[in-house]
Image: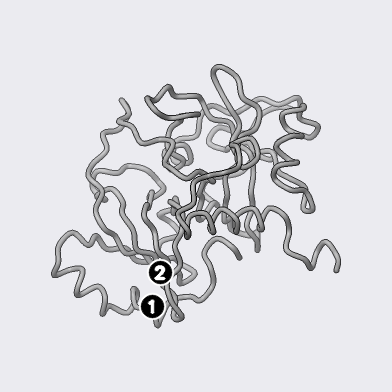
Amino acid sequence: MSDRTRTPPHVEHVRQHLERLATGMNLTASPAEVFLGPDDETHFWEVVGFRMRGVPTLVLGAIRFQRQELPGRDHGRESLGAYLSSPPPPFVTAHGAARAGEISTFLPRWSESIPAFLRRLRGGVDTDAVHLSPELIEVAFDLRMENPGAYESGKRRAGPLVPHAIRTADGHVLYGLARAQASDPDDFVALTQVQQFTPSGKIRLPSVMVNRDYISAMVTLSDQRTRLAAAHWAPFLPATASERHILLI
């Protein structure tokens, strides 16, 4: 079987993460084997996952976060949704920097395992970064077992989490908890405790950041009457949903 026809290691890495979530297992591997790259006193690199417009498969890449000191949290940082909605100043590499508003990421090779990729990054970067436009990222997620950015930011006051139903432009139907729409200025909807509904059943997902421009329909299920009604509305019916996994395509 050729490298192009077998399941690439980065997709298998995400499958293993989804299995941990589905079984409720604690993270047995160290962060350095799962998501953590170069790490210093002020910043660290972390592997996150993307679904991107124009790329037919899942992408994993390491991006640079500023460290946040949060009680009881290792490698605390801002939420991925906030990061993508308001990217930090461009990261400068040996060959220049991204444009303002873009994010820089280092990518594993197609046949490279994520632990090997992380070891390679910690040993010294040997390639240039790829610059991505958050506007073309449809869905993003991280590889942690808990939210690394669960804190009140001075820049935004978090509202309560309420149930939402979302349908993407590709027909995925998602149910989960998100901030009330009126209080969330971000370009990405951060959805937690997520389930994807398909014609053949439900799939448990990690917290996902969904680009608002990728959402074709969304409703806040803030009361019992709306929750009961939404279960009978065409955009949110499992029978009308895509069968394809939103992350593993």
The image quarter in which residue 196 lies: bottom left
- Pointer 1 residue: 238
- Pointer 2 residue: 173
Q: In percent of the image, x 38 and y 78: which residue is there?
A: 238
Mark 2: secondary structure: strand
Q: Residue furthest top?
A: 41
Q: In percent of the image, x 63 and y 36: which residue is there?
A: 104
| 19 left or right, relative to 168 | right
Q: Give the quarter of the figure containing the C terminus.
A: bottom right
Q: In percent of the image, x 43 and y 33: which residue is there?
A: 78
Q: Where residue 217 sits: x, y (%)?
A: 34, 66
- Residue type at mark 2: give it: Val
| 170 left or right, relative to 217 | right
Residue 182 to residue 153: above or below: below
Residue 128 to residue 10: above or below: above
Q: Residue furthest right?
A: 2
Q: CA distance from mark 2 to mark 1?
A: 7 Å
Q: Are marks 2 and 1 in contact (CB under 8 Å)?
A: yes
Q: Where residue 100 sits: x, y (%)?
A: 55, 32
- Residue type at mark 1: give it: Pro
Q: Where residue 168 sits: x, y (%)?
A: 43, 65
Mark 1: secondary structure: helix
| Viewer-side residue, 227 vs 134 | 227
Residue 15 to residue 35: above or below: below
| Viewer-side residue, 211 vs 142 | 142
Q: Residues within 10 Å of mark 1 (few under 14, many from 20)?
A: many
- Mark 2 or mark 1: name the one nearer the start of the chain: 2
